[in-house]
Amino acid sequence: MVPDAPASPAPETSPRPALLLEPHQPLWQRLPKRDAQGRRLADFMMLIPGLRQRPRDQIHARALAIERVLSGYGGDVVFVELNLKLNTLWVSLCARPGLCSELPAAIRDAVPEALLVGPRLQR
């Protein structure tokens, strides 16, 4: 009698962080759309003008500042991508009232040149 083979692990359903090893995949294909409970995620993008032209130590300092801010939001932050080619920061997070304005403001406090990208509303 042959013993049963170990069950293969269930496919991971929880969102995962961006991988630098997958630059050929567009962001929209890598973004998680729902959390582990099936609720839709919220997201925002920030532009950090001139980031890629800065010296490596300044880029690193800004990335660390952003990481410190995001780590303060614990499980609310699900996906983060800092794209140096485009000078953008993309953040996907659990939808919670006020978080999509609070978190970008905290990032802007840490990295003053960071700008929240959003629709232009005309009056």
Image (cartoon, rainbow, N blue to C red):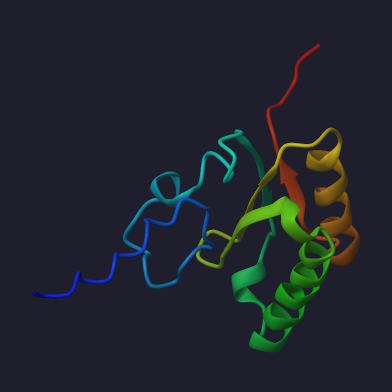
Residue situated furthest right in the rendering: 109
Q: Is residue 38 visible in the rendered structure shown here?
A: yes
On the rendered structure, is 19 left or right of 87? left
Q: Is 30 placed above or below 37 here?
A: below
Of residues 93 and 121, the one nearer the viewer is: 93
Q: Where the N terminus falls, by quadrant?
A: bottom left
Of residues 1 and 93, the one nearer the viewer is: 1
For the point 52% across and 53% down, the residue is 14
The picture quadrant where one finds residue 4 is: bottom left
For the point 61% across and 34% down, the residue is 39
Residue situated furthest bottom in the rendering: 57
User: x, y percentage for residue 59?
Assistant: 68, 78
Q: Where the C terminus falls, by quadrant?
A: top right
The picture quadrant where one finds residue 78 is: bottom right
For the point 49% across and 48% down, the residue is 31
User: x, y percentage for residue 85?
Assistant: 50, 65
For the point 56% across and 36% down, the residue is 38
Of residues 7 and 83, the one nearer the viewer is: 7
Residue situated furthest top in the rendering: 123
Q: Is 105 placed above or below 121 here?
A: below
Q: Is residue 89 visible in the rendered structure shown here?
A: no
Residue situated furthest left in the rendering: 1
Numbered circles on residues, count: 0
User: x, y percentage for residue 17?
Assistant: 54, 63
User: x, y percentage for residue 43?
Assistant: 65, 42
Of residues 123 and 59, the one nearer the viewer is: 59
